[in-house]
Structures are given as C-alpha cells and as structure tokens.
Amino acid sequence: MRTYTDGRHEHGQNFLRDQQTIRRMTDLAARTEGPILEVGPGRGALTFPLEELGRPMTAVEIDQRLAQRLSRHCGGETSIIHGDFLRHRLPETPHTVVGNLPFHLTTAILRRLLHHPHWEQAVLITQWEVARRRAGVGGSSMMTAQWAPYYSFELQGRVPAQAYSPAPAVDGGILTVTRRRDPLLPWKHRSAYAGFVHRLFTGPGRGIGQILQRTHGLTRVQAGRRLGEASIQASALPKHLTAEQWVRLFQRCGADARPARSPKGLSRGR
C-alpha cells in the first residue's frame, strides 16, 4: 500500500528533501520579482519556504490528493490548483516560475514556458545533463541556441539523487532562465532564426564552415567571409557558438537564413 510519502510513478514524483537545495532554490527565487507560479509543489518542500517571501503564489499540482492536503496548510496568499501544468492557463501578467520539474516532462515544460510571453524569470530543477546542456556547459543544445537571443540560461548547482525521496536514477541540476529585457534579435524573426539554427545543427560537415557551405550553397570564400564578419572560426561546431555569434551569422546570411522546409523537423528543436 502506498503512503503519503511515496512518489507516484505515473507522475514522476521524486520529493525534494535536502534543506541545502531548498534554501538555494528559495534564495534564487528571492532575487526575482512579482507573483510566483510553482510547478508541481508535491508535499510543499519549496512551497512553504517560498511563502515566507510574502508574495502571491499559485502552485499547480497534478496529484489531487497532494493538492488537497497542501491547500489545507498554505497561507491565504497561496492558491493550490489541482491540474496539469502543461494545460494550465498561464498568467498574462509578469511573474516568476519556480519548480522541481518531473524529469520526464522537462523538455515539454520548458517548451511551453519559452513560447509564453509573460513570465520574466524561472528557477527550475531539471536532470543534471539537461541543466548543463541548456546552460551551454560543454556545448549548447539546439533548443538552447534557438532561444538564446531571447533568454539567458545559467547553471546554478547540482542536486544529488539522494536529495530526493524516492531517489531518481540521475542527479538534478538547478537551472535559471531569464527573459532578456533587450532581445538580441526582434521577436518577429524568431521562426526564421530557429529554422536557420536547425539547418546548421543538423547539416552535414565537420565544422560550421563546411556546414554553412552545404546548407546554403556557398563557396568556401563566401562562407569564410560571413563567418569572419561574425567572428566565428570555420572549424567551430554549432554547439560551441555563443548567442551573439549565432545572431551575427543569421544577420549576415540574409535571404539564405530561411526556416527549414520541414516544420516537423523544426518543431523538434524548439
């Protein structure tokens, strides 16, 4: 028989219990502003410390039994909603997102957040490797490169598997995502830019120079000139380009910087 402390497999529940991690998450949230939207509060390991910040908070919990129990113990400024965060209507005013994300839903939740225009900062726990890749440690993922002109991603620490009950198979990582007040590229170019990044991440070649030639039909000299103007080495791999380099290269490719023809392929990278 399950007890209240058990995590339910179908919801990917691994309850945070490490006080050092909880303090770190709370401290990072305290540096943000506005109402807080918490993803998957579970037993309230983050919810109760976050309440001490004295800000309005809404927590969305998919497990009805946990939502009901948590609602009985929270303060008046905290609203506990039983629902699926992926279907929850997000606020249309500035807010901060905080959450210990279910590892199997990390990418889906991140995609939903990145497409939503109103939140300003997010303090999240994801799988360790996901947090590293999103923050560009050891090389960025295509998803990070596609969104880097609009958000900054930072790795804030590692969360050992033993910090959870029950312990997951892998460690977690604390990731912060901040919306850029001044985007590096106008939002109207986002789709074309995302397609451009997709083509170069998936194109053939040993370095960005060869990839650019083969995906855009450029000569070696033409590709080299554009890379030089963007301050990029021809041998660099797409995962090692900075957000600024990506934007400069996109701008210098002009009419060639069009979305990939396959919407299905493009959507996988966002």
Image (tube, rainbow, N blue to C red):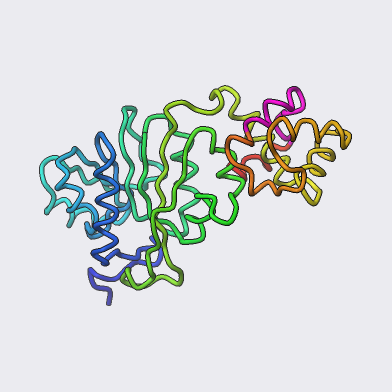
Q: Is residue 178 above or below residue 191?
A: below
Residue 260 percent location from the top left of the image: 72, 35
Is 260 left or right of 151, judged from the image as shown? right
Q: Is residue 252 magenta?
A: yes
The quadrant in which the C terminus is found is top right
Residue ranking furthest to the right: 219
Q: Is residue 76 above or below residue 103?
A: above
In this rendered view, identify the residue nearer to me: 109 or 250.
Answer: 250
Residue 17 percent location from the top left of the image: 26, 66
Q: Is residue 212 above or below residue 47?
A: above
Identify the main secondary structure in magenta: helix
Instruction: Report the residue at 51% width, 50% height from top.
Output: 134
Is 268 left or right of 107, judged from the image as shown? right
Residue ranking furthest to the bottom: 1
Is 100 left or right of 44, judged from the image as shown? right
Numbered range of the magenta stretch: 247-261
In this rendered view, identify the residue nearer to me: 260 or 204.
Answer: 204
Q: Quadrant of residue 179?
A: top left
